[in-house]
Amino acid sequence: MNDILTQLNRIRGIGGSLLCSPDGLPMASALRADTDEDDLAANIATLIGHAYRLTSGMTHSKPVLININGAQGGLLLLAAGSAFLIIITDPHANLALLQLEVTPFVDAIIQRLSL
């Protein structure tokens, strides 16, 4: 899985990536050395829990995409089968293009998780 994330990080606008379970357990990561993957995964689990509650209240299925932007960059969370792919984005990343470029990586992760 780390090989997929390492290739993913080569896409312009991506500053790191993490694959985690919905309950916040890191499964694989390709993050910068100063990023605490356990802390990030735990915080993501809280966010995913809130997203599940929001979407279930609207009678929608589980969340498949969450986008958070800040002045210093952002996070892009994508459902990847039974896991979530977290992508750290640079401040000037083209998010629409990133979503298109990331799709094959999400498909590869889903395929690998189903083995």
Image (cartoon, helix red, strand yellow):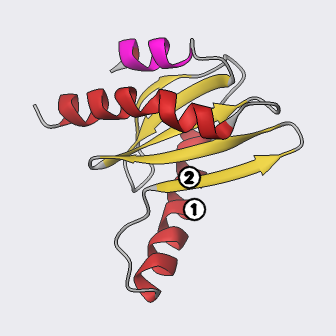
Q: Residues within 10 Å of mark 2 (few under 14, many from 20)?
A: many
- Badge 1 element: helix
Q: Could you tell me residue 3's position as x and y percent?
A: 37, 12
Magenta: main secondary structure equals helix
Residue 93 in percent (x, y) is at 74, 30
- The part of the image, by quadrant, that contains residue 46 is bottom right
> Which residue matches tag 2?
44
Image quarter of the C terminus: top left
Tag 2: amino acid? Ile
Which label belongs to residue 115? Answer: none
Most foreground residue, 49 or 63 = 63
Q: Residues within 10 Å of mark 1 (few under 14, many from 20)?
A: some
Query: Is 28 on the left-hand or right-hand side of 47?
Result: left
Residue 4 on the magenta segment:
yes
Residue appearing at x 14%, y 37% in the figure: 114
Secondary structure found at label 2 = helix
Residue 80 coordinates in the image, percent (x, y): 34, 43
Give the quadrant of residue 107: top left
Residue drawn at (43%, 35%) of the image? 19
Residue at the disc numbered 1? 47
Magenta stretch? 3-9
Which residue is depicted at the point 52% across and 79% down? 54
| Quarter of the figure with residue 12 | top right
**x, y (%) of residue 42?**
54, 51
- Judging depth in this view, the residue of 29 and 105 nearest the camera is 105
As shown in the figure, which amino acid type bears the numbered disc 1? Leu
Q: Residue furthest left?
A: 115
Asked if labels 1 and 2 touch by Cβ distance under 8 angstroms, the answer is yes
Q: Is residue 78 above or below residue 33?
A: below
Tell how many labels: 2
